[in-house]
Amino acid sequence: MNSSIQRTIPNLLEKSCEKFSANILLWEKKSTAYEGLTYAQARQKVYACAAGLMSIGIQKGDRIALVSEGRNDWVIAEVGMLYAGAVNVPLSVKLDELADLKFRLLHSGARMVIVSGGHVHKIRSIENDLPELEKVIVLDGEPVNDEELSFTYLLNLGTEYLKLHQDKFSERWHSIAEHDPANICYTSGTTADPKGIILTHRNYTSNVEQASGLLHIPQTYCSLLILPWDHCFAHTAGIYTLMLNGASMASVQVGKTPFETLKNVPVNIRESKPTFLLSVPALAKNFKKNIEKGIKEKGAKIESLFNKGLNLGYKINGIGWDKGANGTAWEKLQYKLIDFLLFKKIRESFGGKLEFFIGGGALLDIELQRFFYAIGIPMYQGYGLTEASPIISANVPAKHKLGSSGSIVPNLEVKICDDKGNALPLGEHGEIVIRGENVMAGYWKNEKATNQTFREGWLYTGDLGYLDADNFLYVLGREKSLLISHDGEKFSPEGIEEALVGNSVYIDQVMLYNNQSMYTIALIVPNKEKILGHLQQKGLSTHTEQGQCEALTLLESEIREYRPGGKYAGEFPERWLPSAVGVLGEGFTEQNHFLNSTLKMVRGKITEFYKERIDYLYTVEGKEIINHQNKNIIKRME
């Protein structure tokens, strides 16, 4: 490569347009069918957007926020900003707390906001408190004052500007350097004010190269980007990896409400026929739940055949690394037959072309991975964090081990360190530490946090894990979420939490807690429907003492399965299994802020909110699951 050519996102698009100009880049459904926009057509719109921004005064380095559902104009707007030399501040449409939205806009110093019609009311309600905000550009809907303009009008301004100032436009985008900021991505702010992660053009382009080095993406590939587009995962593994390789992306049809948009997902999957999908555990669990529900509705014989097929798949597939080495010829034949009769039809409901999922965002339960592998749509776990743009490792079709987070991407250094920063040998557990071109420039206006995260050029992730002899990474959990016993021993709770939820129909959510105490406790969100169904079969009600005790004993028996003599005995050290349980009446959701926008538990907020419940679980009475608090919660189920 010519060293003078900067490895920026504009140059990435230019290069792809040279090779794939007639390929479809963007698929969008606004009415009855998906329509495609080619690479060449998309670039023309990007040029118009960038020139339009220049015409209304955007200078190199200015910040512009983007608040919108995924759509063609999301990509046009972001890449247009980057051609104009601006920095995009992508924000979640799920930021309903106006204080959260205001903080990000103030902190980033955004001069303008590009926003969809469904969320412009949020900006209008806080704009008087945003002294640096000059313009609001509305993607759909009509402007209501002189400080607002429509995106269509912006593109028209840009088209006119290009007729007169093509040289200025060309000079601007060619002046962008690869180490210039491209995005300021805000963390979810689970412990304090969120941090703005500065990702440069080279951070993104290097990570796209790394991802493509691990997983070959043919230009025929298409992905429906279900995850929020402001997430770094969707940015890199979706938008820019597809763009680099001449492939295409489709957006979920935007409904009148968020719920309506969500309902469009299964329909849009069938229509867009994706080759792969990006997923997070919550989405994967929902897919699995719907598949199992559909099978159950077909009757006991089909359900039995389905379960037999799953078990055969589990045996034959092993952990992926050893696929084919397990199972007899007869078992493999039976599995192929069940695949033809049942699993093939499930795959058709995903459009018929879906080859695999890539899972990120949080640890993906191995049982979920085994399930999707068995039905012929493997879900390959990856690992990353926004500070790394975000991909650090991934399982891919050619090389995978279920239960791991995959092999390290090319051109990234990874080591496992003890709490003093010393590198540990293979197989030993410690903090995951990385160095590479994909690692962020730092935190926006937060030198202290930047210095705490970087040490001698290495980024300390705060995640615990280890590397095996084949260079596969195993992520054990966040250092900050560790259980700490009275004697100082530490343990990552995620594995136990995932197992309790994954292996029990009666438990929907669980958070373990131990802060230097004699034993661990669990806050459990029960599955009300399943609990009530169990009681109904026994002729009991939650309004009776007997019914309450039965429900609580049932939950306790689910945990007992992990103790000696239980079905899952030995899976986890017994000392970390919960000895006391608090049953909750309300689930962890984004609305109550107990889940963040990537659907991870916000442990600090949950712990703070339920402090009195937690304290009670460390009393003699509270340690018994049949206590008055738990009985009251069960009583209110009906």
Image (spheres, rainbow, N blue to C red):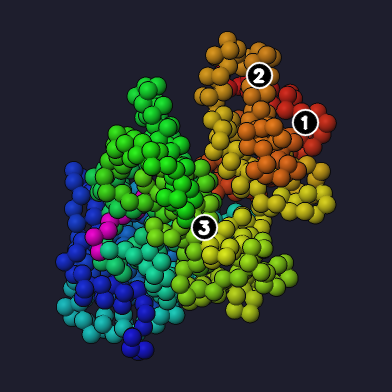
**Of the residues under marks 1 and 2, which one precedes in the sequence?**
2
Q: Given this view, does label 1 or label 2 mark the residue nearer the observer? A: 2
Q: Alpha-carbon neighbours of circle 3 within 10 Å: few (<14), some, or many (≥20)?
A: many
Q: Which residue is mark 1?
A: 622
Residue 220 on the magenta span? yes
Position of residue 592 in the picture relative to residue 373 (left or right):
right
Position of residue 402 in the picture relative to residue 539 (left or right):
left
The residue positioned 62% from the left and 60% from the top of the image is: 465
Identified by mark 1, the residue type is Gly
Secondary structure under the numbered disc 3 in the rendered image: loop
Relative to 568, does residue 139 appear above or below in the rendering? below
Residue 28 is situated, as x and y percent measured from the top left of the image, at: 24, 52
Q: Which residue is mark 3?
A: 405
Q: Which residue is mark 2?
A: 550
Tell me where the magenta segment starts and ends, as one range.
219-228
Q: CA distance from mark 1 to mark 2?
A: 17 Å
Q: Given this view, does label 3 or label 2 mark the residue nearer the observer? A: 3
The residue positioned 20% from the left and 49% from the top of the image is: 34
Q: Quadrant of the C terminus?
A: top right
Going by the picture, which residue comes out furthest to the front?
A: 329
Identified by mark 2, the residue type is Glu
Q: Quadrant of the N terminus?
A: bottom left
Q: Given this view, does label 1 or label 3 mark the residue nearer the observer? A: 3
Residue 515 is situated, as x and y percent measured from the top left of the image, at: 76, 49
The residue positioned 67% from the left and 56% from the top of the image is: 480
**Of the residues under marks 1 and 3, which one precedes in the sequence?**
3
Q: Which of 350 and 623 lies nearest the eye of the viewer?
A: 350
Q: Which of 61 and 367 lies nearest the eye of the viewer?
A: 367
